[in-house]
Amino acid sequence: MKKQLSFIWMSLLLVLAACSDGLDNIEYNSDSGITVAAPEVTETTGTSLTLTASATGNVGDIVRRGFCYSANAQTPTISDNVVDADENFSASISGLMGSTTYYVRAFVYGNSRYTYSDPVEATTGAMSLDEQLANYVAPAYPDDYSSIADWTNRSQWNLSNVHDPTVVLADDGYYYMYQTDASYGNAHIEGGHFHGRRSKNLVDWEYLGGTMQTLPDWVIPKLNEIRTAMGLEEVNPSVDDFGYWAPCVRKVNSGLYRMYYSIVCPGTLSGDGTWSERAFIGLMENSDPANNSGWVDKGYVITNASDKGLDFNVPANDWANCYYKWNAIDPSYIIDGDGRHYLAYGSWHSGIALVELDEATGKVKAELPNPWGTDSDIAAYGQLIATRQMGNRWQASEGPELIYHDGYYYLFLAYDALEVPYNTRVARATNIAGPYVGMDGTDITNVGGDILPVVTHPYKFNGSDGWVGISHCCVFDDGNGNWYFASQGRFPENVAGINASNALMMGHVRSIRWTEDGWPVVMPERYGAVPQVDITESELVGDWEHIDLSYSYGNQKTSSTMTLSADHTVSAGSWEGATWSYDSSNRVLTFDNGVELYLQRETDWEASPRTHTIVYAGYGDNYKTYWGKKVK
C-alpha cells in the first residue's frame, strides 16, 4: 500500500529533538516542605488579571514564584503560560482574550522541585468586538516544533505531531481531537495509540495521551480466522508492527461517543511478491471523552474485501489489478437525517465504499460473509460512492470525510501522495449513497474522474516556507453555524536547518465559509480566534497576496501581488483592468471576470510578529480556486 510505505518511511526517521522539563518532571511534589495557597484575583480587565498568592513552610528555600495559566488545561503547569511574581507573590497577566475563563495556579520552585496550588477559575472582563480586535494577541506556538517534538515535551505540543485528525465537540464544551499514530522522530510510541488532545477555543490544545494502550486482543485471532478460512497458515506478528491509522470520532448522543479506527496488519498474504496483508476497522466507545482512558473497545467492524475469490496471488507490483476491491482504512461515520447510521471507508484500491451500520451496536447492519468471492458475494461490504477511475484498483484517492449541510451530503477526498502533493477535493449528493458530483459536473459514483473544486493544495505565502501535504481532513461545526476544516500540514522537503523537514506535521484548523450555491470554501490562513469585526470596503483597498490554487501535482502554488484601487479597479496583478465590488453584509468580493471571493478575518501567520489580517477564498471560471490575504 502506498500509504503504508509512507508511514514505514516516517517510522525509520531518526530525528534527535532537544529535551527540556516535560510532564514527568514538573508535577506537584508534596515533599518540598512548602505549601502554596490558591491564588486570588484582585483586579480584572478585558485583557488582564492581577493575582496574589502566598506560601507557607520552608519559604526561605523558594528561589522562584509565579502563576501558570491556560484557557484550556484545567491544571496548568509551567509548560503552559507562565508569569513570574514579585517578592509579595503578586503579578499581572496581560494579553488575554476578553470574556474568557482561564485556569490559574500559583507555583513556587524550591528544594529542587516545583510546588503548585490548587487551580482557580478567573474570567476576564467583557469587551466589544472592536476592542477585542484592537487588543488581539496572535497564537505564539512555533510551526517548526522540532525542538519540542520529543515525548518528554508532550505537554508543550499543542498542535505539534498531528496527523489525520478527527474532531468532535463534546457536551463539556471541549473539542476533542484524535489522530493517526505518527510523529516527528516517532516520539508518540511511548504513549499508546490514537492520541488525544482537547481545546475550548480551537487554538490552545491540551495533550491527553493515547486512548488505546495495546493492540486489541481480537485483532490477531480475527486475522488468523480469515487466513485459515482462505487456506493460509496462521501468523503471529509482533504487536509493534501493526499500523494505527485514521480514527473518526462522532457524538451519537450526550452519553455515547464512538471512535472508528484502522488497524493495518503487517506482512503479506502469501509470502514475498504477493499482495499486502489486510486491514481492519474497529470500534471504541466512551460515555465522556474527558476520561481519556475511558474508551472501551467494541471489536471488529469490517475488513478488506476482494471480488477475486481466493486468487490472492496477485503480484504486489501489479497495482491496477490488486487483490482487494475495498481497503478497510480511513473510516468516516455519519448519522443521516432519518437517523440511519453509515460508514464511508477506503483508500486507493477501487475507491470509497459506503456501508450501513446498526444504530445500537455500531457494527455493520448486514451479516458479513467471508471477505472474498464474487461482486455479489461481497455486496454486504459496501457499495461504491466515489472513484477517480472506474476499474483501476490503484488510484490516489483516500481519506473520505462525509458530512451533511443544508440539504446535501458532502464527500471530501484526499488526492495524491501524502508527503508533498496531498490535496483535497469535494463532491456532493442529495442522497447519502450518491451520485456524488463535483462542482464541475463530474459524477464520481457512476462514471469516475477527477473532481473540482480544489479545496486545499500545497501553497506558500511570502515570509514562510509554506505548507504541503494538506489533506485527509475532518469537517465539523460548533453548533452555531460556524464550520471548520482540520488536517495536518507538513513542512516542505529540505527546509534549511531542519532535519527531515517534511516529517514535521502541524495540526491545521481552518474556517469554512459556504458559497451562495452551497459549496465550501476553506480559508487560506489557519484559525487563530480573530474577532470577526465587520469588514469595511475601505479596508480592501491596497495590496493582496493572491494565489491561483489550480491543481499542479506536487508543486507549491506561490503568491503574486494584486492591488485593489479605491476607484474599484484592479491596478496590478493578473486581473489588472478588472473592476470589483463589495457586498459588506455577506463579506463577498466580486470581480467582473465572474470570480466571487469570500472574506474572513484570520491570523497572519507569516507576519513577524503575528497579527490579524483579512483573507479570501473563492471560485471562478473553470472551477478554479483562489486564495489570498491582505498585505499589512
Image (cartoon, rainbow, N blue to C red):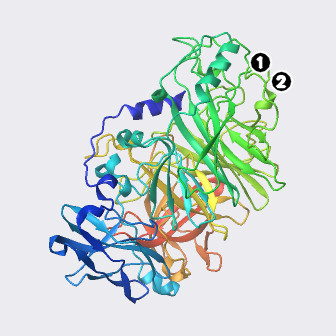
**Image coords of residue 454 (percent x, y):** 59, 50
Can residue 15 be seen by looking at this rendering? yes
According to the picture, the residue beneath numbered tag 2 turns out to be: 376
Q: Nearer the viewer, residue 591 or 318?
A: 318
Residue 276: x %, y % from top left? 57, 21
- Circles 2 and 1, Cβ within 8 Å, touching? The answer is yes
On the rendered structure, is 457 left or right of 465?
Answer: right
User: Residue sitting at 62 percent across and 30 percent down?
Assistant: 218
Left or right position of 281 against 528: right
Q: CA distance from mark 2 to mark 1?
A: 8 Å
What residue do we see at 28% from left, 80% from top? 54
Please provide percent x and percent y for residue 307.
Answer: 74, 20
Q: Secondary structure at mark 1?
A: loop
Q: Residue 8 sits in which quadrant?
A: top left
Q: Amino acid at mark 2?
A: Ser
Q: Residue at x 37, y 52 (%)?
A: 154
Q: Is residue 141 above or below residue 446?
A: below
**Which amino acid type corresponds to the residue marked 1 in the rendered image?**
Gly
Decide if residue 133 is on the left or right side of residue 43: right
Q: What x and y, as percent, mark residue 176?
A: 55, 57
Which quarter of the image is occupied by the N terminus? top right
Per the rendering, the mark at residue 373 is: 1
Numbered disc total: 2
